[in-house]
Each structure stands twice: as structure tokens, then as C-alpha cells.
Image (cartoon, rainbow, N blue to C red):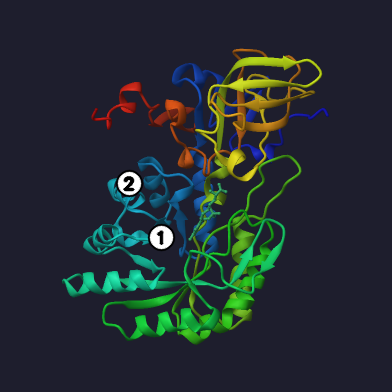
Amino acid sequence: MTEQRISQHLLPDSASILDGRLVIGGCDVEELTRTYGTPLFVYDEDHIRARCREAVAAFDGKVAYASKAFLCTAMAKLVHEEGMAIDVSTGGELFVALHAGVPPGSLVLHGNNKSESELTRALEVNIGRIVVDSWDEIRRIEQLVEKGHDAPRVLIRVNPGIEAHTHEYLKTGVADSKFGFPMADGVAADAISYVRESPSFVFLGVHAHIGSQVFDAKSYAMAIDALAPFVVASGASEFSIGGGLGVAYVSGESSVSIADWAAVVKTSCLRNGIDAIVHAEPGRSIVASSAVTAYTVGTVKTIPGVRTYVAVDGGMSDNPRPVLYGSGYEAFRATDADAERSLTVHIVGKHCESGDIIIRDAAVPADLAVGDILCTPVTGAYGHAMGSNYNKVLRPAVVFVARGKARLVIERESYSALISRDVG
Ligand code: LLP
């Protein structure tokens, strides 16, 4: 199987291939690896800004970036500058967003098990919104308000008993999920009635997130059809459709734009008589294709009659998605990104796990060799964010590039950092 040059739609907006060399944001990627080492995440800052602007325009400013996809202070600042709110789902994400100087009023707190200290911090800073997920959380918030905090503005997370998967639409009879209040048996309606009556809450509306990596915008239309009677009856003044818009990871896949997604969501709400203000919280579609990961090839092992393994200097610690979800990626060489890719290999990481395979049956140039810089595109979401330092492999550095300049936004982890919390 011979693959031609990597599809432009998998690369960041500003990417170009000059004399075969991959250039992002005006910076030569192989040269960046000489300065910053590998593995290296290279993010196209203008690409992220463009997606934020598209989302803000499409959702009339009522849109939060789901920071679980990728978060650091530079990212939080950028997203805030572009007019998006930020969805944080733990005390840690809340801490980073506040540290970046994002006003608390622009933050939305999520989570199915918010601790007392996470909720206390959210109330102390007067967070924009809390998306309430359980009866235990309702009681926890009430106790904190009784101690003197102001009543928070809340949405109730509803589990519609509907799940959208990548290509199929699955309606589950029973709501089997750890997230939200099931719509079934009136549980979600009871939670809303309770919160509306309680002086400990300012009820704003309903939230539903139907899944992630959803390719077909029709799934949203169908979900809204199912949710609408409930949303209307709840008297919600806000309705958040969550995130989940899918992106293309490999050649042959294509995705819906944020603008088209928003159009489907807004039209479906109108058609169903939902007059609440529509909110959304995309993560992946803002940031996934804005980045590539650059690795150095360390070994090329050909097992006669079996296959060739190409090992790079990262793996499941910087991209656990292939291991967790069987997700596919592409790979190409940074210095001849337009080369024919006629060799089929397994690209593997350096971890002590046979399953540490980044790409099965990847198409790569036939002369791929030790020392080459190999890039995997579309690694901007849920890569660095879900990284680990398994095997005490150091977490990679992250650079933002734009208009010919690179800036380091996350340093490579150091060996001393590995023992900084190890108190012996
Ligand atoms: N809102 C809520 C309440 C969510 O739970 C999520 C994602 C989002 C928004 C953003 O969804 P996105 O637009 O990024 O799809 N680790 C998985 C994805 C987990 C998504 C969890 N929640 C992956 O790598 O595919």
C-alpha cells in the first residue's frame, strides 16, 4: 500500500511543505526539534485562534473551550483572548485557568464527583457556572451556601439516555452512565424542581453532552429532538449541548466544521421550540488538528517474513489514544513530507509494553532511518493532556508557533522533576 503526501486537511492551517520540509507557523519543524528536542508538540497558534473565532461567531459568544483536551497557561490565555469561556472539570483545571488570569466569571465547572474543596474554591471565586451532576453534589453545595457562600448559578446535567457514537446513533433504553441525572423516571426533572425551589441555587438551565468524536451532525439534531420537550418544560433560560464534534485523524476521513455544527444545533433548537440561549463547549475541534508531534526514530527492526517495527522516542506516554481507543494516526517524515510512503511498518513507542503501538501498519517512506524526524498530525487534543510519565519517560515539551516565531509554552520534564515529589 503506497500512500502519497500527507493530506493538507490533517495538518495545521498554516502548514506548508517547502522543498519537502514541513513548515508550521513559518517555522521549520525539523529545526524546531534541534532546538527543543523530541518528542515535541508543535501547535499552530493562529489555527487555534481561527477555530476559537469560528466557535465564538457560530455560537454568538456562548461557547466554552473544553480544557480537558489541552490546557496550559498559554492556552487558557489564548482562548480567553479570543472570547471563549473555559470549561474546567477538576480543581486542577480550575487552578490552571485562574493562574492564567482568566476571570472566574468566564469559567464553567464540570465533574461527576466534585469534592468539597473544589466546590469551595469555585464558590470563593464566584465561578461563572457550575454544571451540577448528582444529588450528593446538590447537598454539598447547599451545605457550603449555608456556611455563607453566595448561591451559585447552575445548570443541571441531564443524561438523556442517548449516546452518539462516531458513526452510529444509539438510543439506550436505560440511562447507564456515571454522568448527570437520568431523564428516565423523572430523576432529572426532580433535580431541576428541587434546585429551582432551593435558595442555595440560581437555576439557569440544562446541560447535555452526548459523546465525543461525533462525526455526524445529525446525531445532534436527533439528540435535540429527544431533549427538547424536557428542556422546554424545565423553564431553562440556557441550554448547553456540550461538546463532542469529531475531527479527521487519517486520510479519507472528513469532519463537519464548527460553523456547520452550530447551524445544525441552533436550527434543531428553533425547530423544537427551545427558546433558551444555546451554549456549547467544544474541545477537540478547537485544538486537535492544530498540532503535530515530532519524534526521533531510534530503531528500525525488521523481522524477516513478519514485519518492521520503527521505534520512536515517545509512545503511549504522550499519546495514549491508540492504546485506549484503537485510534488511527498517520505518520510522515518532517524533511520530506511530500515523499511517497511505500513501506508499511508498525510505529511503536519506547515503553515496556508490547501494546505500546502508536500506529499499526503505518505508511512511511521506504528509506526511513534511525535519526529521522517522524511526525504524527492531529495530536493537539487528548495527547499531552492525557500523557503520563510511565517508565519515568519525561513528558514532552510544547511550543506554540506563529508568523515565523516559536515560543516554548511547556518545558520538557526534567529528571529532577521526576523526584521532586518523591520524599524518600
Ligand atoms: N463537555 C463535556 C461535558 C465533556 O465531557 C467533554 C469531553 C467535552 C465537553 C468536550 O468534548 P470534545 O469536543 O473534546 O469531544 N479522551 C477522549 C475524549 C474524552 C472526552 C471527554 N469529555 C479521546 O481522546 O478521544
**Which residue is found at the position 47% from the left and 80% from the top?**
187
Residue assigned mark 2: 96
**Mark 1, secondary structure of its residue:** loop
Disc 2 or 1, which lies upstream in sequence? 2
**Quadrant containing the N terminus in the rendered view:** top right
Query: Is residue 108 rendered to the left or right of residue 404?
Result: left
Asked whether, in this view, residue 115 is left or right of residue 272, the answer is left
Residue at point 33%, 48% (across, down): 92
Classify 71 as above or below 367: below
**Is residue 404 positioned above or below 383 on the image?**
above
Give x and y (percent) for residue 50: 53, 48
Q: Is residue 297 above or below residue 147?
A: above
For the point 69% across and 27% down, the residue is 346
Q: Nearer the viewer, mark 2 or mark 1?
A: 1
The amino acid type of the residue labelled 1 equals Gly
How far, Cα to Cα, is label 2 from label 1? 16 Å
Residue 281 in the image: x percent, y percent?
Answer: 49, 59
Residue 208 in view (yes/no): yes
Q: Which residue is mark 1?
A: 111
User: What x and y, as percent, mark residue 210?
Assistant: 57, 64
Where the C terminus falls, by quadrant?
A: top left
Q: Is residue 224 left or right of residue 389?
A: right
Q: Could you say where residue 214 lies in the image, as x and y percent from the top left?
A: 64, 57
Q: Amino acid at mark 2?
A: Val
Residue shown at 68% from the left, 25% from the top: 337
Q: Is disc 1 surrounded by few (<14), some (14 to 19) or many (20+) residues within 10 Å?
A: many
